[in-house]
Amino acid sequence: MADTNNKSGGFKRQTITEAVAEALREEILSGQQKEGAQLRQDAIASRFNVSRIPVREALRQLEAEGLVTFYAHKGAVVSALSREEIRELFDIRRLLEGDLISRAIPRMPPELIQDAENILNRYDVALENGEVSLWGELNAEFHHILYIAAERPKTLAIVQNLHNNIDRYLRIQLHSAGARAKARDDHWDLLKFCKAGDVQSAADLLDRHIEAGCENLIEFLDEQSVG
């Protein structure tokens, strides 16, 4: 986040609202702000040296993304997802992303394939180096770049929002070496099918990838709650 030493917050390339939203989003996705944590507007405004207006707008933006919930007598808190809600989000992903990849592959240009490969190389490095903050970001970038050729911007925006909602959980899950290896293998196989123009194999793999990711995440969260 930009320097916030002056009253404008030092935000030059972003609006103050966007910059505050970005900083809070990263705190939530990284787990720095825990589920159920209260996000007091006055404290946030003081921390970033801005007025409460952009803070309130930033929190409303995060509410629209599903990361923040407002309560009448408590204000804004970090949203928590139930197991049922997590399953629902993954089920929606399976439907939408399967359609996107099927539409995208026949139109996918070589330069887009190369962009996806570059992202996977960066993703592998981030996994190996334990750069947790990059895991969710690069995972979402990889899926996003594969779906662009589908030319379904509204569907793509919904998928991006779904990724934002589950990103914090996936980061935690990827601390497991087995989960990291599985994600890496699936991504490279998916790219291979895209290169070959094999729509059915890509769609089938993506469906299994998302379904397995959901089940593994639920299992991981259950183990954490017991532990």
Image: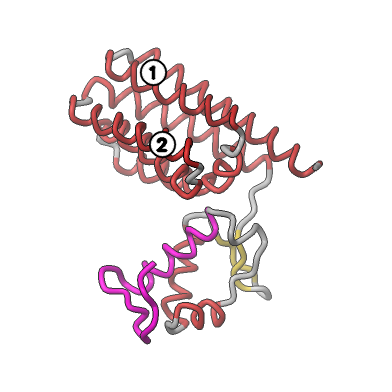
- Front residue of this view, candidates 223 and 109: 223
Magenta highlight range: 1-29
- Residue drawn where x is 59% and y is 67% of the image: 70
- The residues tagged by marks 2 and 1 sit, at their Cα atoms, a distance apart of 24 Å
Corner quadrant of residue 28: bottom right
Q: Residues within 10 Å of mark 2 (few under 14, many from 20)?
A: some
In front of the other: label 2 or label 1? 2
Corner quadrant of residue 115: top left
Tell me which numbered mark, 2 or 1, is placed earlier along the sequence.
2
In this figure, which residue is indicated by the disc labeled 2?
125
Where disc 2 sits, the SS reads helix
* Image spot of residue 126 (x, y percent): 43, 40
On screen, 183 above or below 106?
Answer: below
Q: Amino acid at mark 1?
A: Ala
In this figure, which residue is indicated by the disc labeled 1?
202
| Residue 190, numbered label | none
* Image spot of residue 10 (x, y percent): 33, 78
Q: Residues within 10 Å of mark 1 (few under 14, many from 20)?
A: many
- Front residue of this view, candidates 76 and 50: 50
